[in-house]
């Protein structure tokens, strides 16, 4: 639109400016161009101080909001099509993902974890909802963060009726502008963020391996490290091929270590377990590593 901009967009624009200023105090913070906006407003990496230099590490993405209203994922287009892809992509993110809410009056950025997203598709009977609503500041206080609630929307052809109201808890950190300019505060903020980002990163890796295991902060106390961690384990009636493939790689690494440490008894205890795996279908490195370790363990003692 030439020579004007909708007034209702301006609050969001200013929120992004403020968020970038605060985030840039402790991270590389790259704005996503409007043409490339697929749900992330900034690509970030924390910055580690080494002597007089700053080195990036631990990348994450963040979406910025200017209100504490629920954030909708999925739902239906104006033409009546289900945005299923939004649900699927949200549940399969491959980088840690935060929600940032800017309080312009307080000149503050609140950052929220989205670790509770791992409930979707695993809990509540494994349903894929029509719509997810991420709810900031729920549960209140020190309530336990859980899988939220579902209700039913008006029936529509070709899509589920469930709406999943998913709490994302209290902010993991609340950062005012003045605090972002304080070196000690910056280091504290990075330390807290690293804990939550590493947890999310671990969940992403385990999900890729098909293990069905994830962790989330059971109680989120703003500006304090998590003390209580929830654990989820999802499984089916038959093993996931990804589980078996991932386990073979871990077993090969473990047996290689026992082989190098000359721990024959440790290797021998794994031999019955190996019968559950299709070693012939494994790649040659995995297959040969396991075979050599087993052969070594079965060797007769020298006389």
Image (cartoon, rainbow, N blue to C red):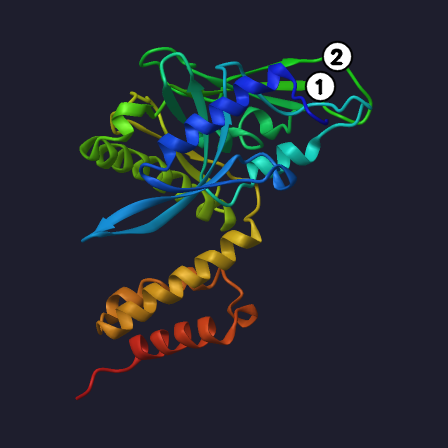
Label whose residue precedes the other's in the sequence (2 or 1): 2
Q: Within 10 Å of the Cα at label 2, are there few (<14), some (14-19), or many (20+) other Cα atoms?
A: few
Residue position marked by numbered label 1 in the rendering: 161
Judging depth in this view, the residue of 200 and 5 nearest the camera is: 5
Q: Residue 172 in the image: x percent, y percent?
A: 34, 26
Residue 216 visible at all: no
> SS for tag 2?
loop
Residue position marked by numbered label 2 in the rendering: 154
Q: Residue 54 in the image: x percent, y percent?
A: 28, 50
Question: Can you say whether 214 is above or below 279 in the image?
Answer: above
Residue furthest to the front: 3
The reply to whether the C-beta atoms of the residues labelled 2 and 1 are less than 8 Å apart is yes
Residue 78 visible at all: yes
- How many numbered discs sit on the rendered protein? 2
* Quadrant of the image occupied by residue 260: bottom left
| Residue at position x 29%, y 20% in the image | 221
| Residue at position x 75%, y 27% in the image | 82
Disc 2/disc 1 C-alpha distance (Å)? 7 Å
Whether residue 115 sits left or right of residue 164 in the image: it is left
Q: Residue 263 in the image: x percent, y percent?
A: 23, 70
For the C terminus, give its image quadrant. Answer: bottom left
Q: Within 10 Å of the Cα at label 1, are there few (<14), some (14-19), or many (20+) other Cα atoms?
A: some
For the N terminus, give its image quadrant. Answer: top right
Question: Can you say whether 123 is above or below 240 in the image?
Answer: above
Whether residue 42 sits left or right of residue 182 in the image: it is right
Q: Residue 280 in the image: x percent, y percent?
A: 54, 72
* Quadrant of the image occupied by residue 37: top right
User: Which mark is drawn over residue 246?
Assistant: none
* Quadrant of the image occupied by residue 294: bottom left
| Residue at position x 63%, y 27% in the image | 127
């Amino acid at each position: 639109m030439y020579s004007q901009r909708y007034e209702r967009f301006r609050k969001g624009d200013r929120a992004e400016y403020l968020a970038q200023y605060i985030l840039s105090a402790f991270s590389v913070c790259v704005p996503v161009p409007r043409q490339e906006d697929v749900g992330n407003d900034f690509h970030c990496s924390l910055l580690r101080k080494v002597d007089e230099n700053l080195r990036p590490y631990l990348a994450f993405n963040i979406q910025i909001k200017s209100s504490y209203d629920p954030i909708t994922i999925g739902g239906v287009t104006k033409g009546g099509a289900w945005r299923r892809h939004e649900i699927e992509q949200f549940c399969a993110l491959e980088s840690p993902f935060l929600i940032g809410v800017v309080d312009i009056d307080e000149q503050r950025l609140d950052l929220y974890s989205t670790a509770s997203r791992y409930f979707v598709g695993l809990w509540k009977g494994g349903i894929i909802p029509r719509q997810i609503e991420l709810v900031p500041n729920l549960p209140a206080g020190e309530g336990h963060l859980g899988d939220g609630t579902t209700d039913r929307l008006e029936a529509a052809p070709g899509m589920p009726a469930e709406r999943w109201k998913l709490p994302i808890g209290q902010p993991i950190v609340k950062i005012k502008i003045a605090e972002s300019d304080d070196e000690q505060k910056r280091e504290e903020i990075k330390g807290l963020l690293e804990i939550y980002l590493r947890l999310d990163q671990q969940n992403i890796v385990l999900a890729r391996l098909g293990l069905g295991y994830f962790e989330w902060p059971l109680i989120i106390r703003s500006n304090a490290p998590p003390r209580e961690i929830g654990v989820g384990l999802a499984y089916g009636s038959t093993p996931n091929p990804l589980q078996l493939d991932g386990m073979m790689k871990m077993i090969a690494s473990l047996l290689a270590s026992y082989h190098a440490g000359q721990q024959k008894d440790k290797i021998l205890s794994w031999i019955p377990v190996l019968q559950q795996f299709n070693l012939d279908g494994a790649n040659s490195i995995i297959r040969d590593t396991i075979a050599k370790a087993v052969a070594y363990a079965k060797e007769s003692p020298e006389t």
